[in-house]
Every structure is written in structure tokens, then in C-alpha cells.
Image (tube, grey):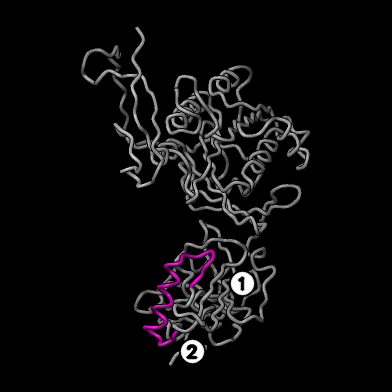
Amino acid sequence: MAKAAKSQFVCQSCGAVSARWSGKCVSCGDWNTIVEELTAAAAPPGSGLAGASKGRALKLETLAGAPQEAPRFTTGMPELDRVTGGGVVPGSVLLISGEPGIGKSTLLLQLAAALARAGRRAVYFSGEEATAQVRLRAARLGLADAPVALASETSLANILATLGEGPKADLVVVDSIQTLWSDALEAAPGSVSQVRAATQSLVRYAKQAGSALLLVGHVTKEGQIAGPKAVEHVVDTVLTFEGDRGHAYRILRATKNRFGATDEIGVFEMVGAGLREVANPSELFLGERDAKAPGTAVFAGIEGTRPILVEIQALVAPSGLGVPRRAVVGWEQSRLAMLIAVLEARCGVSFSNHDVYLNVAGGLRIVEPAADLAAAAALLASLANRALDPKQIHFGEISLSGAVRASPHMGLRLKEAAKLGFTDAVIPAGGEASAEGARLTLRRISHLKELAAGLAACD
């Protein structure tokens, strides 16, 4: 006898389930995201109606034992290998997300072609484009001769049946997970239940077959991965593809990695022949810099284990508005507001009659607190209409009292700056940094007043 279907209402943003429809989700607060879905009625636990097996006892082990390094295979793309922790682990599941048009499909096609040319079997399932469109992109990128197995399909059952036939695939690419559907569910493709079911089925196949699985995930207007959070929890690695389509630079960032470090980044440049890897991002971000312009400072940052030098630009201009404007690109708006407040309260530098604009050059987004000192130097230099020393770098976190705190990995930052020809560094008074190893002239400051006094901006 067939089970009776019952109705439930599922939020398409967070996956919360409710018994009735409402305009606003009580879990995440989003409006008009609740959709009715039909599911098979399940017997309640302990009712005796479900024909569950008795189960078997498991063999328990101890924590002692020699650790085993996860086997990996290199992708032929050093920047991608860096982000994944040294290569792709067979049987692992990777989820990559990014805004539309950022270059996700281009990156995955180049990855599949590189593995196929190296003698591995790569299978590419496109749910958003026809095979003819994928072939056109491959021809434009010069990858038409790569032996990649290609199909345009959105049926989960057909994809699993195709993977079950023939030799095992080393890499399986699904672009994208929101387009798949299973005939076992009556929900529409892209709904929470369909995305969850498709992900779990593909993950189960990858773990059993030992194939590396790479899923593409759409993002919401807030920049978050669309669908239930359970998708991010079940995968091994979550990669985000960042960048401004107005710039040629793309940042591949690992936000979760069970087989490597998180917050590691890979840098790519979008060119006519696809994505080109950038071995030295600092030279790229500083390549078109105007050293004589007032209001620019070079920040020595750390992304994962990689030091990166980037230019921070500030413009402080007299304002004719009752409430001056505060605009920032590539940095946190709240961080800029806090920094301006500290400069006014602790140094006596007033920005109340000025519009303030701050920009991180090159389209890079900075989240590190050590950028405070470089941003403050750019603001003070713009207010004083002075150009900073073009061979000088800044880094250090600024507290609400105006004190400059030490930053981690100071030696790596200084060595990267010395390699690129910088001669001076303004750094926190605390922390270990070897001037001999970095070959830089170090100026240590303990309070923001010292930086402002040097630019003749402090009362």
C-alpha cells in the first residue's frame, strides 16, 4: 500500500520547516521564501510500524596510532592546489560558489581539461548550458582537444546511472547543484528538498567510488551560497570565487577545508584565453600604482599563508552636505567609521566637514584588522594633501584607545616587502620583527598620535 503524501512548508533560504504557510520565515526573517512541498509520510520513531533493521555493533578504535596523510593528486594548476591544501583528495567533495559571470565555469572547464590531458578521467555535467555552448567555450579557451567526457543533464537519476557505467571517473563536475532534480520528490528544481537530496546522493556516490566531486553553487543577493546550510556542512571543502567584474583579478578563497588550511587564497587574472594564474599577486596589485599621489599607502597583508602587498587609496575632500559622505570599497564600512572616530577622539583630527572615500586597489577585499594602520596613514595623508614615501609599507591593528597592536606573521610581511624593493616600514612597537632579515628600516609606533604627528595632522 502506497504511503500517503503529506504537505509541509519549507523556507528556501534557510531550510526551516513549518506546519503552515506564512509570509515571513520565523527562522531567518526572509519574506516570501516559504514554499509548500510534498513528502512521503514517515512512521514516528518507536511506533513499531517502520521496518527498520536491528543494526550491528561497530568496532571501536582508540585515538592512538600513526596519522595517515590523505592521498592527493595535483590538478596542474598550482594556485588551485594551494587553496585545496596541496591537491584534490580522491573521494572528497568540493563546493565552489561565486557571483554570476565571475568565471566559475571557465575555471572548472580548465581544471577538467588539465586533468584529462594528464591521463585522468574527467566528467563534466552541465545543467545550465547545452553541450554546444560548452564546446564553444572550450574552443575559445583552446581546450577542444582535451578528452573531457561532457553531457548536458539535470536528472539526478540519469547522472548517477551514467557515472555507474564505464571506468571510474577521477573528477566529476556538476554545474550547478541547483539545476538538478529527482523524480522521487515533487518539489521544483532548486528547492531546498531537491538540493539536499541531490547533494546527499552525489556525495554518497563520491565516497563509495572514490571520485573527486566538484559542485557549483549559486549565491544569493547577499553573497551567501543559496540553498540549505546542510549542503555546506556535508561537503569537505567550500571555495568562494571573489572579484569585481570591472577588474581582471579573481580570488579563489577556501572558507572550509577538511584536508587543508582555511582562508588560503589563489589569485587568477581573467584574460582572453581564460583564467591565468598569478604567481606573485603583490606585483599585480601594485603594478599600476601612482606613487606621487597623496592619500595612498601600501598595506602588507596576509591571506592564509601568503603575504600580499596592496595599495589602499583615500580621498578626503571638503563636503557641502549636512552629513558628510563615508564610502568604502574593499573594506568594512564599520571599520572605517571606527577608525575615523579614533582619529577624531584620540588625535584631534576632525573629519566632520569632509567627505571620506576609501578604496582597496585591484578589487581585493580585506578583512584583516592589521590594515587599520595603512588606512589611517592614507586618510591622514589625503587630509594633509601629502604623498607618502613610495618605498614605505604600513601594517598594524588600532584599538579604540588609539594604541597600535602587534600583528601576526610580521616577519613574512617584511620579507615580502623587501623582495619587492620597499625600504621602510611603519609597524607596531610590539611584536617580533627582524630588521636584519627583512633589510628594512623599521619605524615602530605605539600610538596613532605618532603617525598623525609625523604627517603634521595632529594638534
- Disc 1 crowd rating (10 Å Cα; few below 14, some 14-19, many 20+) is some
Amino acid tagged 2: Ala
- At 59% across and 30% down in the image, what residue appears? 172
Q: Give the camera-side residue of 24 and 315.
A: 24
Q: Which residue is mark 2?
A: 457
Residue plotted at (73% across, 29% down) = 147
Mark 2 residue element: loop
Residue at the outermost top position? 1
Labels 1 & 2 near each other (Cβ < 8 A): no
- Dot 1 falls on a residue whose secondary structure is helix
Q: Residue 236 in the image: x percent, y percent?
A: 47, 38
Task: Give residue 319's position: percent from left, percent from top.
Answer: 51, 82
- The amino acid at mark 1 is Ala
Q: Where in the figure is residue 13, as x and y percent of width and height?
A: 41, 41
Give me the C-alpha separation between circle 1 and circle 2. Answer: 29 Å
Residue 188, visible in the rendered structure:
yes
Q: Left or right: where does residue 440 sit relative to residue 115?
A: left
Residue 51 location in percent, x, y? Answer: 29, 11
328 within the magenta span: yes
In-image side of 62 versus 303 (left or right): left
Quarter occupied by the N terminus: top left
Q: Residue 335: say if magenta.
A: yes
The 10 Å Cα crowd at callout 2, few under 14, some 14 to 19, many 20 or more, is some
Viewer can see residue 431: no
Q: Main secondary structure of the magenta part?
A: helix
**Viewer-nearest residue: 442 or 106:** 106
Q: Is residue 3 above or below residue 93?
A: above
Residue 454 higher or lower than 167, as above or below: below
- What span is in magenta? 326-350
Which quadrant of the figure contains the C terminus? bottom left
Task: Kindly identify which residue carries mark 1.
Answer: 418
In front of the other: label 1 or label 2?
2
